[in-house]
Amino acid sequence: FIMSEKINIKPCKNNVGAFIDLDINLANYKMIAKIKEAVNEYGVIFFRKQKLTSENYIKFAKNFGKCADYPMLKGLEGYPEITVVEKKPNEEIMFGEGWHTDSTYTAHPPKFTMLYSIKTPEKGKGNTRFASQYLSYEGLNENYKKKIENLEAVFSADGPISKTRNNRTAERGTGIDPKSLFAEHRIVRVNESNKKKSIYLSPGHVTSIVGYNKDQGQKLLEYLFKHQVKPEFIYSFEWEPNCIALWNNHAVLHNPVNDFNGHRVMHRITIQ
């Protein structure tokens, strides 16, 4: 246990993620500074037993930066900053299933994502898995590190994960054509605050590597995608209602597990 500014930080296995014991309604600016440090260090942090109004949730999010727009869906009624991430009973497909990091097809993808659980299936179902991209970078051999050091990839809203949005865009879509949203970003990221390097590749969005022919590019991507999600880089978070996960999109991939038929409702805020 690390005690800091009356914050209890408990790292998870392999330092992938950490739990923080705190009522975030009571967080002061010193605590917020410690939370930022923790999310940069561990990639993702978790809070249980929160009681938040939408106003308080947005207020907390704004401590970490500016709330970002999500181009594909309209926000919650009265709270445009909040995207409702929902799987309805008996829907087969779950929004966002598959390994990815959020909104990578935009010119300035959100640095942080926050998810607040409103309604969850039984404990142990509908977990979100997080894969540390600090560990995945460290785990690459030197040849691969050199090879990807200056490479860029093309990230598209029309990548493989786009089909998981279809039920929601039918209800609350903004009408933007996913094919029109793409961006190029460097594959290796350096966290300014602690100088840790990570692999920034989103299997759900990446379509090619800049400057590589299709076959060469696909081969390298297949290798990296597989490497990014090795079991030793992963922590699986068990949801219950009133939990918050806050993660650094540069430092972790996430993948919600679609293994239930019940109703799951999450409120998501992305932060620039």
Image: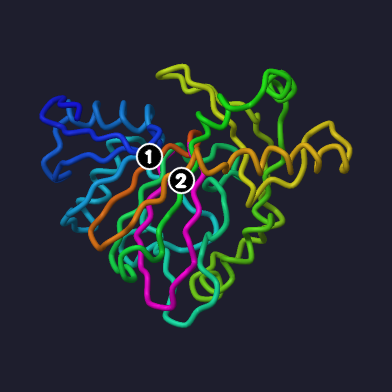
- Image disc number at residue 44: 1
Residue under the point 56% across and 66% down: 165
Q: Which mark is residue 241?
A: none
Q: Main secondary structure of the magenta part?
A: strand
Q: Residue at x 68, y 49 (%)?
A: 156
Residue 130: mark in rendering: 2
The image quadrant where one finds the C terminus is top left
With respect to residue 149, does 32 lie above or below?
A: below
Q: Position of residue 136 (x, y in %)?
A: 56, 32
Residue 142 in magenta? no
Q: How many numbered marks have been drawn onto this rendered protein structure?
A: 2
Circle nearer the N terminus (2, 1): 1
The x and y percentages for residue 98 are: 57, 57
Q: Is residue 265 magenta?
A: yes
Residue lying at 73% horizontally and 27% vertically, measured from the top left? 151
The span shown in magenta is 252-272
Quadrant where the N terminus lies? top left
56 or 222: nearer the viewer: 222
| Along the viewing direction, whichever of 143 and 158 lies nearer the viewer | 143
**Three-letter amino acid code at disc 2?**
Phe
